[in-house]
Amino acid sequence: MTAHEATAIEIAAMRRALELAERGPAAGVNPRVGCVILSPAGDVLAEGWHRGAGTAHAEVDALSHLRSGQARGATAVVTLEPCNHTGRTGPCAVALLDAGIGRVVYAVGDPGDHSAGGAEHLRDAGVEVVGGVLGAEAEAFLDDWLFAARHRRPHVTVKWASSLDGRAAAADGSSQWITGEVARADVHRRRALADAIAVGTGTVLADDPALTARDAAGRLLDAQPVPVVFGTRPVPADAAVLRHPRDAVLLSGHDLVADLHLLAERGIRSLFVEGGPTLASAFLAAGLADELLVYLAPALLGGPRLAVADLGIATIADARRYDFTDVTRLGDDLLVVARPNPSRAPRPSASPTEGT
């Protein structure tokens, strides 16, 4: 075994660290991290995990359970590279050095501009460091946080329901209900999984949506997304979105990239864009849709009320290409899931959402 390899005991400790990380809060600006400290003989000395913003990081939490000097020469096994910056708490890399840790094993590198570099700091101080241990498992576990940290914005899912001919409503504007109960239940399940749900002010004024996640009986689910409204028009004081269990976030929509940065700073890692066509099209045109959920009803409506508005595409060569990742039958309807084709992905731009 060399300093660049993890032992079987360390790999087992990493699995335990991932279990500990699951105890932390799934939402917020900070990741869920777990840590196990092993003696030089491989015995578990302490365990820790991060409990949320402002609390001790996993490494510091684990160290707090040890007597002075007990960590000297020990190995810290942690799911995320120890941070190297001072925020609400001090740098974990420094805390490990001060405790006398002799070896650090981590799963995933820290992607932060200011927090990365802990591994290099530790190596420069003479600590053995091994990275990438159970990296795939840790990447999957931290998927939403890593996306937000790497891209400085939430993962964006754009959803719409339409007829087979791509209409979101009939000519008179009526749209309830294009799809059936099974499809609508799936939408509510996905709402509950998202950190936030977004519509434009046009949808608020036209439909007065509650933007809550509900069960088949209309009861609120335990998990509720933060409601976000994009647009320049004022939201009425009696709008249903302002009675949501979570405080609504109102954004101008002039610069979607900047608005998404603001949401990421609030700890929002995933955004479910649900309406209407103007807002959905703005995200699509800006290249900011990471996933499409298209609920197709076996119906034809005709008329002008398209599910997607003009995307500024003048020729077939400029078509936005997506890969189908799933097609599911939901009652009488179909759910098509698609993600951008990496070879044809557009560059994100700051597209306005005027009129939403």
Image (cartoon, rainbow, N blue to C red):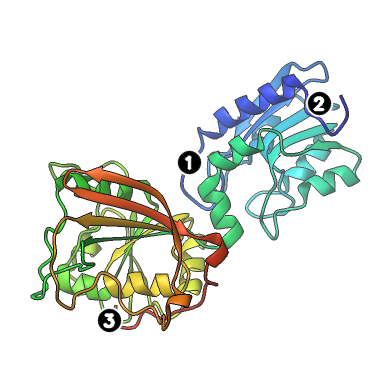
Res. 237 image quadrant: bottom left
Residue designated by label 1: 25
Q: Which residue sits at x=62%, y=30%? A: 48
Q: x, y percentage for residue 311?
A: 38, 78
Name the mark nearer the viewer: 3 or 2: 3
Residue furthest front as drawn:
316
Q: Do the residues labelled 3 and 1 touch (CB within 8 Å)?
A: no
For mark 2, does the 10 Å Cα neighbourhood hold few (<14), some (14 to 19), or many (20 or more) residues?
many
Q: Quadrant of the C terminus?
A: bottom left
Instruction: Let me know if residue 155 appears in the view.
Output: no
Residue 332 x/y as whole percent: 16, 47
Amino acid tagged 1: Pro
Checking the image for residue 74, the label placed there is 2
Residue drawn at 14 percent across, 59 percent down: 178
Question: Which residue occupies the foreground of this view, 158 or 61?
Answer: 158
Looking at the rendered structure, the secondary structure element under dot 1 is loop
